[in-house]
Image: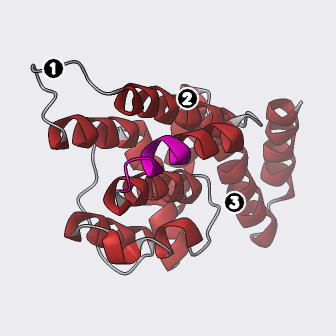
Amino acid sequence: MLARVLVGAVFLMEGCGGGPQPADWQLNSAQSLGQFQRYYLTGDSRADAEFAYLRRELSATGREDLVARAELVRCALQVASVDFNDCPGFAALRAGAAQAELAYWDYLSGKADRASAADPLATLVAAGVQLRRGSIRPEAIAQAVETASSQGWRRPLLAWLGVQEKRARDAGDAEAAARIRRRIELVSG
């Protein structure tokens, strides 16, 4: 969903809805963003190279807002995968970001609320935000695990299984922790 939002924004901003052929950078960016998202979520090592290519394509426009949006997509994928950082790529472009991007950054940072969509990635992002805030419930963790599992998204699945395993160990539930550990090993193998 996040990739579709960026792609749609790129095309809408450039007025390519039914007019002239889109510029190469638009087509390349749209394809690269989709590839990056797939690679990242499946734990494919090509994700970093794909994001670097995406950034080069968007940077060629000289538009901070477009590059900032791509950085927010990366941040959202990281939050969905329980990889919390300060999103330095977006922070460097914050001054050129639109109000909507700043509001989304506040959400990803756990500083603001946002209505959740019924999209698998949005579900994982919302769970990540709840975890970051320290307000996640066991049911939301289980939902994040099953969402990542049903999509075949290895990276967030391993992250959420790790959260589940830690919670089971902390609760003294050795049987549940062992069951989750076997699942982690299966996904990792």
The majority secondary structure of the magenta stretch comes to helix
Q: Residue at x 32, y 65 (%)?
A: 104
Please tell me whether residue 110 is drawn above or below residue 143 in the rendered image: below
Residue 166: quarter of image: bottom right
Residue 3: quarter of image: top left
Instruction: Compare residues 89 and 24 and report the one nearer the observer.
Output: 24
Residue 45 appears in the rendering: yes
**What range is drawn magenta here?**
55-62
Check residue 163 in the rendering and tell me which mark sits there, or answer none: 3
Q: Amino acid at mark 3?
A: Val
Decide which of tag 2 and tag 3 comes sooner along the chain. 2
Task: Provide the secondary structure element on which disc 1 rests.
Answer: loop
Q: Residue at x 85, y 46 (%)?
A: 181
> Spatial distance from mark 1 to mark 3, Cα to Cα?
48 Å
Find residue 149 and report its horizontal and vertical position in percent: 60, 32
Find residue 30 and report its horizontal and vertical position in percent: 40, 30
Check residue 35 in the rendering and tell me which mark sits there, or answer none: 2
Q: Quadrant of the C terminus?
A: top right
Q: Amino acid at mark 1?
A: Pro
Is residue 135 highlighted in magenta? no
Q: Residue at x 75, y 55 (%)?
A: 162
Task: Provide the secondary structure element on which disc 3 rests.
Answer: helix
Q: In front: mark 2 or mark 3?
A: 2
Residue 153: quarter of image: top right
Which residue does the numbered mark 1 point to in the structure image? 20
Instruction: Compare residues 161 and 171 and report the one nearer the observer.
Output: 161
